[in-house]
Image (spheres, helix red, strand yellow):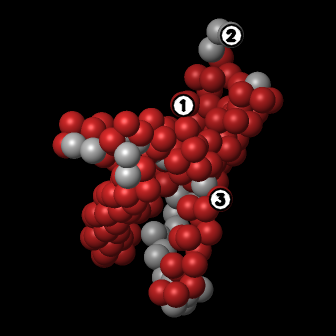
Amino acid sequence: MDFLSVLPFLSAAIILTLMPGPDNLFTLAQSLAKGKNAGAAYLLFLAYKSFKEKDSDFNLKNEDNLDYKSLYKKGVIMNLLNPKVSLFFLAFFPQFINYENGHVSIQMLVYGMLFLIQTLVIFSLISIFAGKVGSFLRKNPTISKKINVIQGSLFTLIGLKIVFSEK
């Protein structure tokens, strides 16, 4: 295992970490399975919800008051059930192992640790950024109301584009 083999692995791991999660895959799968109208209807439903909430403030109060242990458990369960992580480790991970060099278990351990570290760094950065954006939005309720309108407009435009597009 050398730097030239670690670089493609880290690139693939970072792309995987930044990719949208299971909810987006579910929407995509439903749209593919049930046709474009189901996907468009779902987007229009999301638009309706956004417009309905256009006059509400951005409320970030944690009503669940989950402790860190509960949040950690939720994160582990979500990742164990996340198809994109499973696919990565079942389909792509073995391609980065150099069986000719031997020490396969050590290579797997090193790659696994690299995956964990890069995920921790990216999720930490996302958390810090989201915390700053959340604080900003709590201090500026006018902006959060406009975000709901913009979100609803985007969902409407995308939904209508899907409905009226050629097959």
What amino acid does circle 1 point to?
Leu
Q: Residue at x 27, y 38 (%)?
A: 5
- Which label number is shown at residue 81? 3
Q: Position of residue 21 (x, y in %)?
A: 54, 50
Q: Tell me the tag on residue 167.
A: 2
43 sits to left or right of 62: right
Specify the amino acid type for callout 3: Leu
| Whole-number angstrom distance, CA of label 3 to CA of label 2 | 33 Å
Residue at left offset 51%, top offset 79%: 72
Secondary structure at badge 3 equals helix
Residue 32 image offset from top left, x and y in percent: 71, 28
Which is more N-terminal, label 3 or label 1? 3
Residues at discs 2 and 1 in contact (Cβ within 8 Å) = no
Mark toward the viewer: 1 or 3: 3
Q: Is residue 125 visible?
A: yes
Q: Residue 93: give x, y in percent of width and height.
A: 47, 43
